[in-house]
Amino acid sequence: MRSRHYLEEIGVASIERPAPWPVTVTVLALVVVVAALLVRQVVTDKPNHQAAAGESAPAKVAHR
């Protein structure tokens, strides 16, 4: 039967971090930047959709 202490079996202390701090900080910073860009994209697209919704059908077709 297997032990419940898998980390000890493979020789990894549970206190060790799986990635160094600079890598962790870099990945988190990239996630924050991508999230900010996505939020900004969603917020800036709303006025464009609202403006297009108020136009008449021929005007919408003319913009295509």
Image: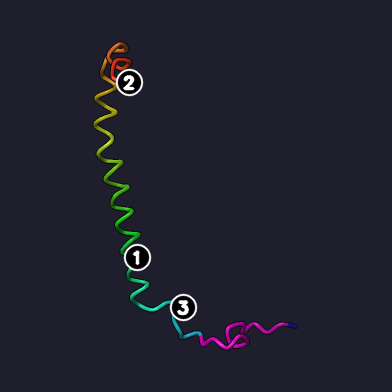
Compared with residue 28, is residue 6 higher up or lower down, i.e. above or below? below
Circle 3: is it few (<14), some (14-19), or many (20+) Cα within 10 Å? few
Q: Which residue is mark 2?
A: 64
Q: Which residue is mark 1?
A: 28
For the point 29% across and 21% down, the residue is 53
Circle 1: is it few (<14), some (14-19), or many (20+) Cα within 10 Å? few
Contact flag, marks 3 and 1 (Cβ < 8 Å): no
Q: Based on the displayed image, in which of its 4 quarters is residue 21 positioned?
A: bottom left
- Segment colored magenta: 2-13
Circle 2: is it few (<14), some (14-19), or many (20+) Cα within 10 Å? few
Is 7 a magenta residue? yes
Q: Secondary structure at mark 1?
A: helix
Amino acid marked by disc 2: Arg
Marks 1 and 2, Cα distance to the nearest angstrom? 39 Å
Q: Secondary structure at mark 3?
A: loop
For the point 32% across and 12% down, the residue is 57
Q: Secondary structure at mark 2?
A: loop
Where is residue 8 drawn, in percent x and y?
A: 59, 88
